[in-house]
Amino acid sequence: MFREVASMLRGGVLSALCWMHFFWGMASSMIFSLLPIFIVEELGGSSKSFGFLEGAVVFISFIAKVFSGFIIDAFKKKVPMLRVGTALTMASKLFLACAPNVFFVFASKSLDRFAKGLRQAPSDAMLAGLSADKGIVFSLRYSMNLAGFLIGSVITSGTAYFIGTNYRLIFAASVLPTVVAMCILQKKIRSNNDYYELKEKHKWNIRDIALLPREYWLFMGVVALLMFNRFSEGFITLKAKSVLPESAGLFPMFMSAYEICAACVAIPMGRISDRLRKKNVLAFGVGLLVVADIFGMFATSWYSVIAIYIFAGLHMGATQGVIGAVVVKSTPQHLVGTAFAIFYMVEGLTLLCANSLAGLTHKVAKSIALPEASGPFTMGIIASVAAIAYILTCMDKGANCNKTR
């Protein structure tokens, strides 16, 4: 398997896409951990303003993903969308390095998330046409993105250690990975390549949504249930804080364990999903999240807290590539962008509801003699068990879950 992965990363369109996601992830991580401190310490903002910023930019990214999915099916042009998204990402990093106040930070971050949303759908659609083995293809891209994020975090930590926390310098340096990504895009991916420009010029219409098959809509039910247990990692941090109030310095290390676990299992699980029934792999991955939730409900020590991060990371690695593969397998070729746009819509709206409900479960948990921070995990177990039952029953009706598809 390792030789197979190495050959995939050695050349070709798939390799180019994976390395682009690697460098995009690296650029994002160089800003991710420092931005809250930059807003509060250097610009005099508040945690409230940071919370508003995060909520707004997530919404902007969600809108951009939906928009780009429909656009690429309508105009059959994926590469120009990738170029625009990458160029806007480069510009957003420079704007952030020069931001004089919180408003400019908001504008820069909004531009960055909008650019990420524009890149996502064409990247998904291009991967969909590259290989018959969809699971490993989507899993490889996910692993490369996480690897870039981790390396970017190490670079940022090393830079801060040796030259001090010069926020603007680090933000400006984050432009370099995006420049590399743009060079890869310009050199390796061309608009007239048969890999991703359809030979069949189907004229897209909004009514084509009705052409999406039954198994696709059944899978959207799985996605909706699953996202109710994919509430923000911030709730895991709150649980860790309630168990280890004096050990906040360990939380970044715990988050790194989450990312490492996800990156390590994504490719093997993607390969397994291409050889076995995808519904079984998906159900197993959701089961890993149930284990994380059980630890989340009853954690009382540092090792039970880190178990939450580990099993949540294993879940992400085991399911993220499979989800992308099932979307592609259950969708006509000329509607892949539309299918992903609807997927992003279901995902975004469900996550909005899930995070809102998770924030309200503290009182419920207290009323049944559980610690307040255990409420979201209780909700998560209910959603995951329902998702597993749905996967093992309803997904049997879709041919996309069969090994032979």
Image (spheres, rainbow, N blue to C red):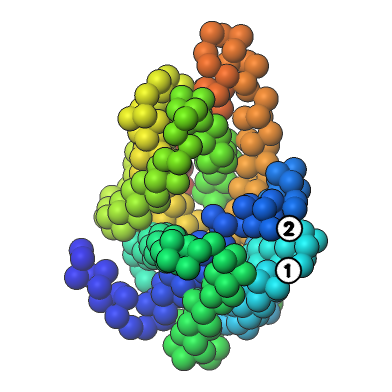
Q: Residue at x 35, y 55 (%)?
A: 263
Of the 4 image quadrants, the one containing the C terminus is bottom left
Residue 175 shows in this picture: yes
Q: Is residue 362 above or below residue 176?
A: above
Q: Which residue is mark 1?
A: 99
Q: Report if the CB atoms under discs 1 and 2 are less than 8 Å apart.
A: yes
Please rate how many residues cluster around mark 2, counting C-alpha atoms within 10 Å: few if below 14, some from 14 to 19, many from 20: some
Of the residues shown, which amino acid type is indicated by label 1? Ala
In percent of width and height, residue 49 lies at 76, 48
Q: Nearer the viewer, residue 237 or 5?
A: 237
- Answer few, some or many: residues within 10 Å of disc 1's Cα (few below 14, many 20 plus, some between 14 and 19): some
Q: Position of residue 206 (x, y in %)?
A: 74, 64
> Which residue reaches farthest front?
163
Mark 2 lies on a secondary structure that is loop
Q: Is residue 158 left or right of residue 191?
A: left
Circle nearer the N terminus (1, 2): 2
Can you identify the residue that label 2 sits on? 43
Q: Amino acid at mark 2?
A: Leu
Q: Secondary structure at mark 1?
A: loop
Place residue 140 in its image quadrant.
bottom left
| Residue at figure coordinates x 68%, y 69% from the top left | 96
Which label was assigned to residue 186? Answer: none
In the displayed structure, 54 sits above or below 206; it is above
In the image, is residue 20 above or below residue 363? below
Figure disc tally? 2
In this view, the residue in front, 90 or 187, is: 90
Which residue sits at x=63%, y=15%? 364
Q: Answer above or below: position of 44 versus 97.
A: above
Closest to the observer: 391 or 124? Answer: 124
Q: Residue furthest right?
A: 103
Identified at 33% across, 83% down, the residue is 11
Q: CA distance from mark 1 to mark 2?
A: 9 Å
